[in-house]
Amino acid sequence: MVAQNIGFWIIAVLMIVAALRVVTTNNVVHAALWLVMVLAGAAGQYILLAAEFVAITQVLVYIGAVMVLFLFGTMLTRARIGAESDLNNSYKKLGIPVGLIMLVAMGLALTRSFGDEQLPDSAKVVSTQEVSDQIFGPYLLPFWALSFVLLAAVVGAIVLARKD
Amino acid sequence: MSPLLAEIPYWGESLLRVLGGLVAVLLPAGTIVYVFLFKMMSFMQSRLGPMEAGPYGSMQLFAEVGKWLQKEDIVPERADARIFKMAPVIVLLSTFLLVVVVPFGPDALFTDLETGIFYALAVSSVSVLGILIAGWSSANKYSLLGGLRAAGQLIAYELPMVLAVMGVVIQAGTMNLQKIVVAQNSGSMFGIDAVGHPYVISQFVGFVIFMIAIQAELTQAPFDMPIAESELVSGYMTEYSGFRFLIFFIGEFATAGVFAMIASVLFLGGWGVPFSWFGWTSIDEVDNWMNFAGPLIMFTKMMLIVFIIMWIRFSYPRLREDQLQRFAWKGLIPVALANIMFTSILKVVF
């Protein structure tokens, strides 16, 4: 397990640096690209956990779709080259305590529920097939409900965007 | 591990994989440029093409690469230099990530991902990011327009591509590219197993949609609005020169090669020959020589697919931007959805 731990820490440090750069950089597109690095790091962590399906989905949805649309939108509207001075707003300071509270809450939740518990040496790797059997078996109803919510969002977006 | 690689240590195997990846990306790219871009296009236009460098102009490619390498690497003064330099590398990176899942033989493969085709579709979308930031960081209106057009086009045509692949996945019952190859070569049609069961026959609608979609994904004419030279100079590549332009150029044709390989795996049976020819019944019985013949068979099928792509590229004029979007959203996607429904109904019935 040592090699995975080293990999975890390298990716984790890169992700933290990139996440800090997202909020400190003074260019919108640079911020978006640092965010791509955070999301790619998350995909790398999923691969270290042998969750290839989740990792690929992360790349497909977040890097291939969400970030591309995000960049597309900013480039169409306001993205300038070089530093911008008006990126920070007056709620900047409010973000720090919110972030800290989130960190403490999630850290507590994780340590309370798992504590010193360790994975057994022969930890079972859940294959993609088992994941899909679960989704299309016992979790079929929540899956449908989620699809329905997404469909409603799509229809709503079209209604809002259409002029006629 | 496989009998072929049994005696090679892990580091040697990794080295072989890296070298194999380079060959699998660069060799098709070079061949495509010489055979189709230099020669076939010239013959279609009643001229000879490059004839001076080497016998029959065969060394022209090396001359071109040398020319690009010694050119100055110019970064526009107002460009965002770091991102400008990074963009072509991201585009080429996605090609190298893409070739990783393509199987070339019973054991000649880089990795045997259970969700291979899903992975391929995911990493192919990473190149959009490179093109988008290439257009933005050039500080040029033409580049930015080209980048935005490219992004809109790649997003629009990724959907029909995914939906066309779903038909194959439903029919094969797996997303693993190796298993899709085996399913096609060990299957039979109407009780005749002489030709196996290449999905180009039973998934012909899917095949046509997939071919149109990769034509657009590769931004080849008639879908080359992102680099439309009469409107946008050269789109997102306008400001690039020297070896960074070369990287874009290699990326374009290497991606064409890799997409053609994926198309031949999905629809033409990939590296395999119908297993009944040699009396094999499963992948374990396939003889070892297929590890050497497989890549050649694959290469032939890839050249066939790229031939079709290039033939269309050299024959048809460019569509208009709004025609392109309408064609994807109102034409291809409904047909692809109907194809999925039809395929799944037949899958359940039979």
Image (tube, rainbow, N blue to C red):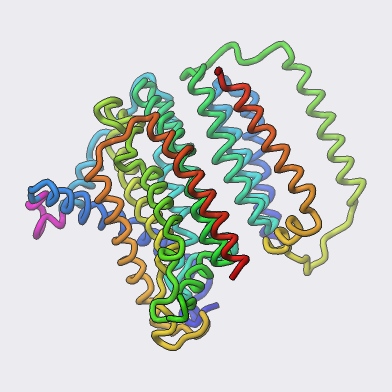
Tell me if residue A70 is in the magenta stretch: no
- Is residue A2 in view? yes
**Residue A67 image offset from top left, x and y in percent:** 57, 34
Split into 4 quadrants, where in the image is the C terminus of chain B?
A: bottom right
Q: From what the image shows, is residue B313 above or below residue B136? A: below
Q: Which is more toward the observer, A86 or B214?
A: B214
**Residue B172 image offset from top left, x and y in percent:** 54, 67
Q: From what the image shows, is residue B325 above or below residue A98? A: below
Q: Main secondary structure of the magenta part?
A: loop
Q: Residue at x 37, y 61 (%)?
A: B24
**Residue A154 image offset from top left, x and y in percent:** 64, 33
Q: Residue at x 34, y 61 (%)?
A: B302
Tell me if residue B53 is in the magenta stretch: yes
Q: Which is more toward the observer, B334 or B285?
A: B334
Task: Tell me: A103 left or right of A157.
Answer: right
Residue B55 lies in quadrant: bottom left
Q: Residue at x 54, y 60 (%)?
A: B343
Q: Which is more toward the observer, B85 or B94?
A: B94
Q: From what the image shows, is residue B285 above or below residue A147? A: below
Residue A161 lies in quadrant: top right
In the orientation shown, which residue stands out farthest toward the front? B349
**Residue B17 image offset from top left, x and y in percent:** 45, 65
Task: Tell me: B32 left or right of B189.
Answer: left
Region in magenta: B49-59
